């Protein structure tokens, strides 16, 4: 066991980002203090839509360097719907970080916490324990940073799948299926989600998936078209373990899975590469409720737990993994005993009350 001092780039961003980040740092500090480590040094790295308004860039070089040199990145939310680039698109520094730091695996754990709301009425909703893996650097997002061709009569986007890009994220999915701790079952399976019956790029994706599967004979594999998967995730999500898919498909289905667990305020995520890791809630900046104390910080808490767990495994630091488990368990206990009823779900608890309840469990 080692105890390291980790440098964490903190990118709070816009809207409710600073609010949930402030709450998150309170929870992280409490958990780390309770466990007795690891040492954490938080370094502010500004950026986002308001920064773009003020400075003409959404991700200054200094912030990118802070993120690049950090042990991990803790990301709140960036972007505002009324702040647009000259080509009409919203600012998206998180995408620049994904491409620039090779954060190729978008990891979205999907679990329903005891006592947390879910639109699923089936009692088996409590059995949901899956992970959605989204390829982050190719697919339909491959050309987003290229200048748009001006043509008043048409527009197009390219879907790029390379063997190297697909292989590394599919390999990540199989490695995760082999090693992750499951709460209710030890079934080990990776589902390939694609549209291989129609699109050439997706037929190639499936071919790469089959090639990678041959290196993991002890892990089961199956296949689903993305439209069928959208239906299956509503009807029987408890049947899945790990699923891996192209960028745009992952962008869409990860919001669907967030709905299964109660909403974006309950959905953590990590963008992970071979060297760097960025952890953020799945929700956006929600400017309509910014400053009102209504934001649900649970997804931010669980994303920080993912960060600590990743740091712990990456650096052999048991203090970090223990702090991660402490946060997870504190959130689960707060919901299970009814101490957390977010405004998001018609309850009475805003950011401060939810933070207080989780801190009490820690």
Image (cartoon, rainbow, N blue to C red):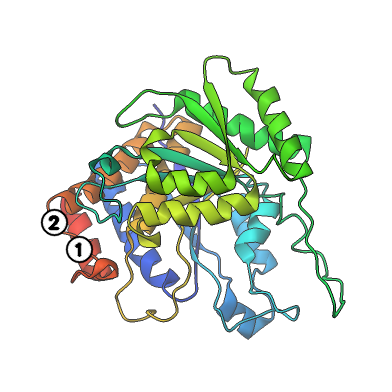
Residue that extends furthest to the top in the rendered view of this protein? 217
> Is residue 71 visible from the viewing direction of this image?
no
Residue tagged by mark 2?
A: 338
How busy is the neighbourhood of tag 1: few (under 14 within 10 Å), some, or many (20 plus)?
many
Residue 208 placed where, x, y %? Answer: 72, 30
Quarter of the view holding residue 262:
bottom left
How many angstroms separate mark 2 from mark 1 (CA)? 7 Å
Residue 356 placed where, x, y %? Answer: 20, 62
* Contact? badges 2 and 1 (CB < 8 Å): yes
Residue drawn at the location 37% of the way across and 23% of the way down: 186
The one nearer the camera, 298 or 4, is: 298
Q: Is residue 93 left or right of residue 140?
A: left
- Residue 82 in the image: above or below residue 110: below
Residue 328 placed where, x, y %? Answer: 29, 45
- Residue 212 in the image: above or below residue 123: above
> Is residue 125 visible from the viewing direction of this image?
yes
Label 1: which secondary element: loop
Residue drawn at the location 64% of the way across and 17% of the way down: 215
Quarter of the view holding residue 266:
bottom left
- Residue 225 in the image: above or below residue 339: above
The N terminus lies in quadrant: top left
Quarter of the view holding residue 57:
bottom right
How busy is the neighbourhood of tag 2: few (under 14 within 10 Å), some, or many (20 plus)?
few
Residue tagged by mark 1?
A: 341
Q: Is residue 210 left or right of residue 29?
A: right
């Amino acid at each position: 066991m080692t105890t390291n001092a980790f440098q964490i780039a903190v990118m709070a961003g816009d809207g409710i980002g600073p609010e949930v980040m402030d709450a998150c740092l309170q929870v992280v500090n409490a958990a780390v203090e309770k466990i007795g480590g690891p040492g954490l040094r938080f370094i502010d790295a500004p950026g986002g839509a308001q920064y773009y308004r003020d400075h003409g860039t959404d991700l200054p070089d200094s912030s990118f360097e802070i993120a690049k040199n950090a042990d991990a990145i803790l990301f709140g939310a960036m972007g505002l719907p009324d702040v647009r680039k000259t080509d009409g698109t919203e600012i998206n520094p998180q995408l620049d970080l994904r491409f620039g730091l090779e954060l190729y695996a978008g990891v979205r754990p999907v679990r329903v916490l005891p006592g947390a709301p879910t639109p699923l009425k089936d009692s088996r909703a409590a059995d949901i324990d899956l992970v959605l893996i989204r390829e982050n650097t190719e697919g339909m997002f491959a050309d987003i940073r290229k200048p748009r061709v001006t043509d008043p009569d048409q527009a197009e986007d390219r879907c790029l799948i390379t063997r190297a890009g697909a292989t590394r994220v599919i390999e990540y999915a199989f490695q995760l299926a082999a090693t992750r701790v499951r709460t209710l079952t030890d079934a080990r399976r990776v589902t390939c989600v694609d549209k291989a019956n129609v699109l050439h790029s997706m037929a190639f994706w499936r071919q790469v998936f089959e090639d990678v599967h041959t290196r993991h004979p002890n892990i089961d594999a199956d296949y689903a078209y993305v439209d069928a998967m959208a239906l299956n995730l509503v009807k029987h999500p408890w049947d899945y373990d790990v699923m891996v898919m192209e960028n745009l498909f992952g962008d869409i289905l990860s919001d669907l899975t967030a709905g299964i667990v109660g909403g974006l305020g309950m959905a953590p995520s990590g963008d992970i590469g071979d060297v760097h890791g960025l952890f953020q809630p799945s929700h956006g900046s929600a400017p309509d409720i910014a400053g009102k104390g209504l934001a649900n910080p649970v997804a931010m808490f669980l994303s920080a737990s993912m960060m600590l767990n990743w740091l712990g495994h990456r650096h052999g630091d048991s203090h970090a993994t223990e702090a991660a488990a402490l946060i997870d368990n504190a959130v689960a206990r707060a919901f299970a005993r009814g101490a957390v009823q977010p405004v998001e779900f018609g309850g009475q608890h805003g950011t401060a009350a939810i933070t207080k309840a989780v801190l009490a469990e820690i």
